Amino acid sequence: MAFPHRLDAPELPDFSMLKRLARDQLIYLLEQLPGKKDLFIEADLMSPLDRIANVSILKQHEVDKLYKVENKPAVSSSEQLCFLVRPRIKNMRYVASLVNADKLAGRTRKYKVIFSPQKFHACEMVLEEEGVYGDVSCDEWAFSLLPLDVDLLSMELPEFFRDYFLEGDQRWINTVAQALHLLSTLYGPFPNCYGIGRCAKMSYELWRTLEEEEDGETKGRRPEIGHIFLLDRDVDFVTALCSQVVYEGLVDDTFRIKCGSVDFGPEVTSSDRSLKVLLNAEDKVFNEIRNEHFSNVFGFLSQKARNLQAQYDRRRGMDIKQMKNFVSQELKGLKQEHRLLSVHIGACESIMKKKTKQDFQELIKTEHALLEGFNIRESTSYIEEHIDRQVSPIESLRLMCLLSITENGLIPKDYRSLKTQYLQSYGPEHLLTFSNLRRAGLLTEQAPGDTLTAMESKVSKLVTDKAAGKITDAFSSLAKRSNFRAISKKLNLIPRVDGEYDLKVPRDMAYVFSGAYVPLSCRVIEQVLERRSWQGLDEVLRLLNCSELAFTDMTKEDKASSESLRLILVVFLGGCTFSEISALRFLGREKGYRFIFLTTAVTNSARLMEAMSEVKA
């Protein structure tokens, strides 16, 4: 398929509708408790709720006081209590303890539990066990799509990664299918579907079942989005484990972007206060630098500062009428831009300080060596030194995982030595974390004499023997050979560069990792879109252990406009990084496409490691 070269980007669908829907549904649920009520909110629903319905909207619908769901007893005097929580067992115990305390005290009140994004049977079972099921009314707020930006939707389910990829828990798959169903109801059917990974396949099949049950809802609608691509996080762990160097990724790695906004501390704002900044396309300064390699950002910001100064200076020779116009029309915009500019300059300076202190250059050099497969012994010594100096438990783990995946597992001697050093340096309580990383295939040990063929025959015997049912953990982690070197060669992930790689004018997606590596996930998406199928990628699928788990579904869609066929929704199951988002935005600009991202949560290497860790920070 020949790509149109540099066409104007197609218009994005308007996702603000999703916010309105979620808000209306929440208001409807709150109004079912007429009169004044107190609302108890779980901590990790606070930020998403704030983006949908702020406090004043809640107050309008007779929410009196707001409390955080925490481990201490509540002191609410209201006659009606409403709980807005995730479907977790501990939350049910919390609600039950409140209700039972009231019973003991002889108080009768009304209780309502609103589960978001859905309620699970297990939660109702707990309420029943605790003897309060009859006292509590349960509802669900099917809020699973939060627009963080014009092209980014998040389900805000960070636990999805651990639940599915470590515990093998499939409960969120229904939430994903419902979210996709909602999108196709609002924005028309998706004519072309592609996917890779076990979770992608299950979510896709369940979504299709939902569509068939409600047949006719999207029939005859014009598709607004021409392609949808579902991808499991475990297809590509390498990209998620790398340090990020595009501005938005670096801000996330350094300050943690939470639910689309970031708290910049006093070291950035150069005052004694912290500042909460919303990072999206509306921030004009941020929008121009978010996808840039960090080395270009300072230059861009100083140029911007000079232009601003020039605009301020124009007022010097103005007469009164021009001055009046300037003040009423331009000044406010300039001041706003000035404020944002100083915030981002402050953020850059703070990042520079931190990275110089951590010797970031050396770290990046080691990562690039691991990706390219050079100087493995030197890289291993670097990791050992990192552990011995106790730089950071999460960082050391990340480097060990990167070494393991790129090398297809560690040789037993290295595995034992690194593990021992790690436990001695950071404490024996991390022992369970190693077991988790092994199960997920992130940090594995090569079995002695384990050629792949002997391995494959073991696994295939197990798979064919239906009585074996679910492959045991040990075997599934053996089956998860990462084959990174072979995939990297096959898909040309390490660009061969003559001379310097020009980061100012990037030539391919590798710029998001300083020209050293093209994100595997993005390369797979690019290849499939180019071919409009998985044809010719059989070898890649075999190496990714996904031969049975890749699918394509094309409908003969006459209604799809050429505009909609240039819009692609990419669904990351298990989280996606800002680097991948930047890389695909670049690909879109090159090929005349526009990508829209839907992710279970935005992730980065630290979040990935924390999800696997048994030691809570």
Image (tube, grey):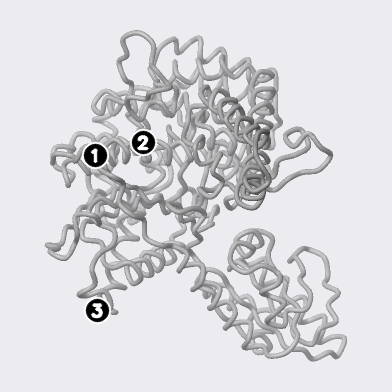
Which quadrant: the C terminus? top right
- Is the Cβ of the residue at disc 1 closer than 8 Å to that at disc 3? no
Q: Earlier in the sequence, mark 1 or mark 3?
A: 3
**Residue 270 in the image, given as x and y percentages of width and height:** 78, 34
- Cα distance, mark 2 to mark 1? 25 Å
Helix, strand or loop at label 1? It is: helix
Left or right of 291: which side holds 422? right
**Residue 31 in the image, given as x and y percentages of width and height:** 63, 86
Q: Which residue is mark 2?
A: 586
User: Can you tell which quarter of the image residue 211 is in?
Assistant: bottom left
Q: Closer to us: mark 3 or mark 2?
A: 2
Q: Earlier in the sequence, mark 3 or mark 2?
A: 3
Left or right of 369: which side holds 488? left
Which quadrant: the N terminus? top left
Left or right of 95: which side holds 377? left
Which circle marks residue 541 in the picture? Answer: 1
Q: Residue at x 78, y 37 (%)?
A: 266
**Residue 12 in the image, given as x and y percentages of width and height:** 36, 56
- Cα distance, mark 1 to mark 3? 33 Å
Residue situated in front as seen by the camera: 477 or 58 = 58
User: Can you tell which quarter of the image residue 474 is in?
Assistant: top left
Q: Residue at x 14, y 37 (%)?
A: 536
Q: Which residue is mark 3?
A: 215
| Dot 1 crowding, Cα within 10 Å, few <14, some 14–19, many 20+ | many
In the rendered view, would you say 382 is above or below 189? above
Residue type highlighted by circle 2: Phe
In the rendered view, would you say 566 is above or below 225? above
For residue 457, say whether it is visible.
Answer: no
